[in-house]
Every structure is written in structure tokens, then in C-alpha cells.
Amino acid sequence: MKLQHATWPEVEAYLEHSQGIVIPIGSTEQHGPTGLIGTDAICPETIAQGLSDQGILVGPTLSIGMAQHHLAFPGTITLQPTTLMAVIHDVVTSLKRHGFKQFMFLNGHGGNIHTTETAFAQLWAEHSLADQDSGLAMRLVNWFQGRRVRELINALYGEADGWHATPSEIALTWHAYPDQIRNVPLDPDQAPFGEIRDALDYRRRFPDGRIGSRPQMATLDHGRQFYEAGVEDALEAWQALIESDQAQ
Ligand code: NI
């Protein structure tokens, strides 16, 4: 069930049996010469569709994230960390007003992790300082770190999955949009690894945008496998979140 395809009476009826919602969160940033700018939003949105198909409510994708380090490449859009925190704060607070309590942010971008966790801490802190029970169970779930997905990455690519513009995420976008496959020669074959700092430093270290990856290894069939593994991992994380809250 997708929030954007629901009516308010349907949301009201959903809330009578569940107070949980999945929010896909990603980024709009360069993904090397072959990866789509929307990769980090497309991946969690695609996996969230599998959860939606099982009756779990899925909110709109937060498709712009914290991507300052990619700004030296055309097409990248970033929110500052404080802006993204404010967005997460207002999204959660709006939904809390209706009675939602369990929030699973299904994330596709490493650069969102610290900011999202800090936004959760900020929300809890506001209630703690006011001596109020927030009732909020919020969890960040990175699709690319799920157990089944990691096993598949290790089996298919090993270290050549790299850190950015990875064959795993690119394969998943191909599964979602098979008409958007790019095949462009890449040099070097596998990109270098290194530290992430500001945008100009990033472009000097990683001239074509990739970090440590060999996205040429991606195939459409891998994309299907990542979709299936990603949905299983995300379902398990969802059930753990709901059960942890019901155990209180
Ligand atoms: Ni990515």
C-alpha cells in the first residue's frame, strides 16, 4: 500500500490495525559514468515496492539527501545536514500527529546515515527534555547492508563492489528500469579507494566519480537477485521493528 496512492479514509482504516510506515530515503547524485543520478533513491524505492505489495504502508521517497561530496559532478543536488534533519523531523512529526509510531527509513545512501540517526536523536531529545513519552520507534535500515544482500555482494563481486557506483546498486536500478542500461568503457577497470571529504577533493581523488567499484560486473539477472534479497532483508527488519515495539 502506497501512501501516495491511498485516500485519507484508507489511511485512517490502516491506522486501526497498524501504526507503522516505511519511508524510502535516498539521494540525487552522480554514480560514475554508467550509474543513474537517481540510483540511491531508486534502490530503496524499488525494494519498498515489494513491502507495499505485502500490505505495508510506504510513504513518498525522500529522494534528495546529504550528498555534498558529489557536488563537483553535474546533476548532483544536496541538502545540508541540518536541512535533511529538518525534513526528517517534519515528516515524522506530521505522521506522528495521525497516530503513526513505527518508522522504518529504508536508505540507499551512505551519506545519509549520520544525519538520519542524528535527526532521530533530535526528535527523541525534544520529548525527553519536555518529560514526554514520544512513543516513537524509528529505525534506519540500509538496504545494501542486509544479510542476504551482503552475501550476494560477496558471492558476485567481492571487494570489486567498492563503496560508490557499486555493481550491486547499479544492477538493482537496471532491474527497476531495464530501458536505462548504460555500457560505457571505464578506466581504470576498478576505481581507487580513499577518504571522502569535500566536493573538490572528491573529484581530484575519484575523477570519474566511482570509489573502489567495478560496475561493469553488473547484470540484469543480478538486479533481480538483489531485488529478491533486498525485499527479504527489509521484511525481516520491518518485523523486528514492529516486534521490538510490541514487546514494550
Ligand atoms: Ni549509491
Image (spheres, rainbow, N blue to C red):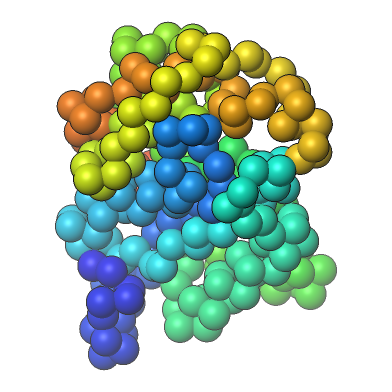
**Residue under the image location 76 percent in, 69 percent down:** 126
**Image quadrant where residue 78 sits:** bottom right
* Position of 199 relative to 27 (above/below): above
**Residue under the image location 51 percent in, 37 percent down:** 31
Estimate the x, y position of residue 50 in percent, counting from the top left.
23, 50
Residue 241 seen:
no
Residue 73 seen:
yes
* Position of 176 relative to 194 (above/below): below
Q: Residue 219 vs residue 144: left or right?
A: left
Q: Residue 133 vs residue 52: left or right?
A: right
Estimate the x, y position of residue 148 in percent, counting from the top left.
32, 25
Q: Residue furthest bottom?
A: 9
* Position of 137 relative to 230 (above/below): below
**Residue under the image location 33 percent in, 28 percent down:** 183
Which of 237 and 225 lies nearest the eye of the viewer?
225
**Image quadrant where residue 14 sits:** bottom left
Number of numbered tags placed on the structure image: 0
Q: Residue 247 vs residue 110: left or right?
A: left
Which of 139 and 90 lies nearest the eye of the viewer?
90
Tell me the quadrant of the picture where the N terminus can be found.
bottom left
Q: Residue 196 vs residue 107: left or right?
A: right
* Position of 107 relative to 216 (above/below): below
Which of 227 and 7 lies nearest the eye of the viewer?
227
Estimate the x, y position of residue 146 in percent, counting from the top left.
40, 30
**Residue under the image location 56 percent in, 47 percent down:** 29
Estimate the x, y position of residue 222 in percent, counting from the top left.
24, 25
**Image quadrant where residue 36 sits:** top left
